Amino acid sequence: MAKQRALGADATLLCAFETVYGTAPDGSGGGVYSKMSFKSTALGAEQPLGYDALLGQGRDAQDPHYEPVTVNGDMVVPVDLRGFGFWLKALFGAPVTADNGDGTYDHVFTSGGVIPSLSIQTGFPALTVPVFNMVSGAKLGGFQIDMARSGPVNATINNNIGQGETSAATTEDAAPAEYILQRFSQGSGSIKLGGAQLAAVTAGSITFSNNLEAVETIRSDNRIDGADEGEATAEGSVTLRYSSDSTVRDAVAAQTPVAMEFGWSIPGGEGYALKLTLPRVFLPKPKASIDGPGGISAEYNWRAASDPVAGYMLRATLTNDIESY
């Protein structure tokens, strides 16, 4: 039975890469769009009201005016074995894929290139009169992944910019492609420094940004001309318990960059894994604070830079059973 009120449980998220910026691909043939799993989305258009008071009109408020339309918002998605490759392509560009010959494929995504644009449809199909909002010309600004001891791994895809939004009563693709969901677990995560597993890590995070800039030209349709990629950056933190292991302290004292890797795997999954490799990371010297009789921790807020030898700042390697993205 159709519903009068929208529920998040009924919502759908369909995505497709655009051939022409700002033009949503025609999904009438089915399978053009991919149905994506998500935890939340705030991507959409908004148009606030502005106010410019005039004198001589009395004390009561006058008409407001409409400010320009902006299309932006963050999304939270699962870091999973197959679907996350779609998001990585949107964040970094198309990967270089290698067939391992055993039914698995290595997809290598590298930062610093030109990223594609997307059309992203948020749908409420269970309503009495269904509503499907299509954001076109969307580019993804970056992501943040926090590491913990337990739970599934999620990524916040943030600082996204779209060109425009339209609404329709029917979906663009009634038979979208769909990735089989298999999530990475925090319990399978690891952080390596110089190729060796870091000891006594209690928390960690990695943040990547494309530093997008909206091209806000004067147009009668109230849309932007595009979103340009700025300097790609990567930074984050690792929190360690003070111990006899001096790996990080030695790296800090040397004031030389080190290689860092964040990774997750699927136990018994034929080598299925996701690795985020940063070949040149700088570590600061944190203040050593003693706050009580318990264990002492230190948080290192690191920053990555481009490696002229490796030729990249950040590389994501996803090993799964998907032939191509």
Image (tube, rainbow, N blue to C red):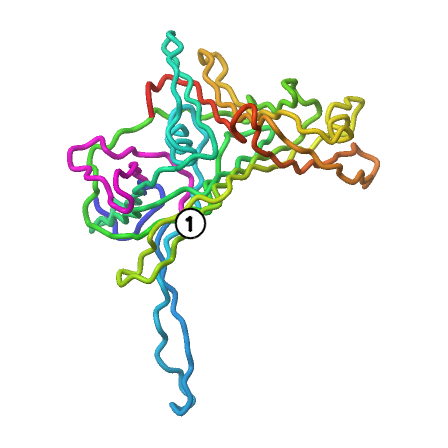
Q: Residue furthest top?
A: 102
Q: Amino acid at mark 1?
A: Gly
Q: Which residues are magenta?
A: 13-42
Q: Is residue 203 found left or right of 214 in the rendered image? A: right
Query: Who's the residue at 66% across and 26% down the image?
Result: 258
Q: Is residue 325 found left or right of 185 in the rendered image? A: left
Query: Who's the residue at 31% across and 42% down the image?
Result: 120
Query: Who's the residue at 39% across and 15% down the image?
Result: 98
- Residue 222 sits above or below residue 53 on the image: above
Location of residue 279 (image quadrant): top right
Regarding mark 1 in the picture, which secondary structure is present there?
A: loop
Q: Position of residue 12 (x, y in %)?
A: 31, 40
Query: Who's the residue at 42% across and 23% down the image?
Result: 81
The verdict on residue 28 being magenta is: yes
Return the residue nearer the eye: 11 or 76.
76
Q: Which residue is mark 1?
A: 73
The verdict on residue 54 being magenta is: no
Location of residue 93 (image quadrant): top left
Q: Position of residue 64 (x, y in %)?
A: 36, 75
Magenta segment's dominant SS is loop
- Residue 12 sits above or below residue 148 on the image: below
Q: Position of residue 280 (x, y in %)?
A: 61, 29
Q: Give neighbour class at mark 1: few <14, some 14-19, many 20+ (Cα, 10 Å).
A: some
Return the residue nearer the eye: 210 or 102.
210
Return the residue nearer the eye: 226 or 245.
226
